[in-house]
Image (cartoon, helix red, strand yellow):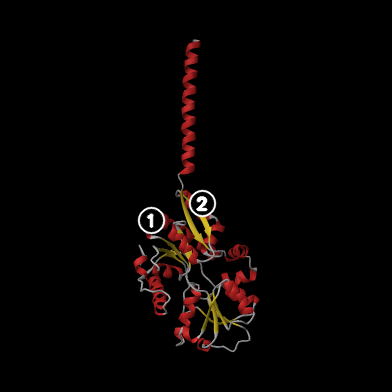
Amino acid sequence: MTQLVRKTMLVIFLFLWAVCAIYGYTQTIEKKTTLQTITIGYQKGDPIDIAKQHGELIKNMKKQGYKIVYREFADGAAEMQALASGSIDYARTGDTPPVTAQASKTDITYIAVGASKSSGSAILIPQSSSLSKISDLKGKRIAYTQGTSSQYLLLSALKKAGLSSSDVTLVNMKQTDASIAFSQGKIDAWVTWNPYTAQAEVSQNAKVLTTGKGLSKNRDFLLSTKSIAKKNKKVSSYLVKYLSQDMKWANNNKSEVSKLLAKSLSMKQSVIEKMVKRRDFTMTGITSAVLKEQQSIANLFYEEGLINKKITIKDTVLNTTN
């Protein structure tokens, strides 16, 4: 082989190597940037928080071409604002925020729903209280948090007992402030949800006047906007599928979930164990029965003047499972 031939072959080899190297590098960069970012809003201790700490949702969604980003919020109202502004794509809230959001013409749609948490929702009274039934609340000072499941539970309980909001003194407070007021005897009753219910029972010797059973389901909801959901049907279906798997894991590993949430919520292990023990973890598609529950909230809020227009919950839903 002549020297010229050798040089020619070397040049060809180097050229081909360079092309392959550049192509390979380009492909690597493309793979790193092809993931579509999906931002989910959540609150400490909720199903999204559990999925976040479990770590499987990020892995599963990455396999499908999506990067999950989590954003923590203090409450559902803040999540609804973030959803409306487009700073998040999905939000996990309770049952009341989507109702008030729809009434204010926020573009929302229901994606998934969790199991009832009625056993952990409660109207609490001090251990020394003489109150024994809901009708005894007449004329009493009751703490709740506006725009949350506690508001609906209270109104629902009063209505069942033949009372109205005008028959009691409503005290709108953040749950942390209500806890302090309760311990100081400044309120006669406190409407709340887990983990506050469990914490009050364990640390403040609180009694349960009534739970949410038969009054309020207090479900978790995964929400989005219609515009985002229509463009991301696959994303929504994947989220329902993988969150459902995470919740099945949570049901089968409640001891581990308790440890995760105790750390996340910075609460005593005994409090979190009490909370986790009395609830089921699920995440499924929206059903017509769930829509009826949400409509009941909307109807009562309209009757009480809390929303200024009648709304139809099913108008927000793209698909139901039955």
Residue 270: image x %, image y %?
Answer: 64, 71
Element marked by disc 1 = helix
- How much space separates mark 2 and mark 1, taking CA atoms? 19 Å
Residue 227 visible to the viewer? yes
Give 41 or 84, whichever is nearer the viewer: 84
Give 300 or 208, whichever is nearer the viewer: 300
Q: Residue at x 47, y 13 (%)?
A: 5
Q: Residue at x 45, y 85 (%)?
A: 164
Residue 154: image x %, image y %?
Answer: 49, 80
Name above or below for residue 217 compared with residue 228: below
Name above or below for residue 162 compared with residue 291: below
Residue highlighted by disc 1: 233
Give 63 or 163, whichever is nearer the viewer: 163
Q: Amino acid at mark 2?
A: Lys
Element marked by disc 2 = helix
Q: Amino acid at mark 1?
A: Lys
The reply to whether callout 2 and callout 1 are in contact (CB within 8 Å) is: no
The tag earlier along the polypeptide, 2 or 1, is 2
Q: Quadrant of the C terminus?
A: bottom left
Q: For residue 50, what is the image quadrant?
A: bottom right
Q: Residue at x 41, y 57 (%)?
A: 236
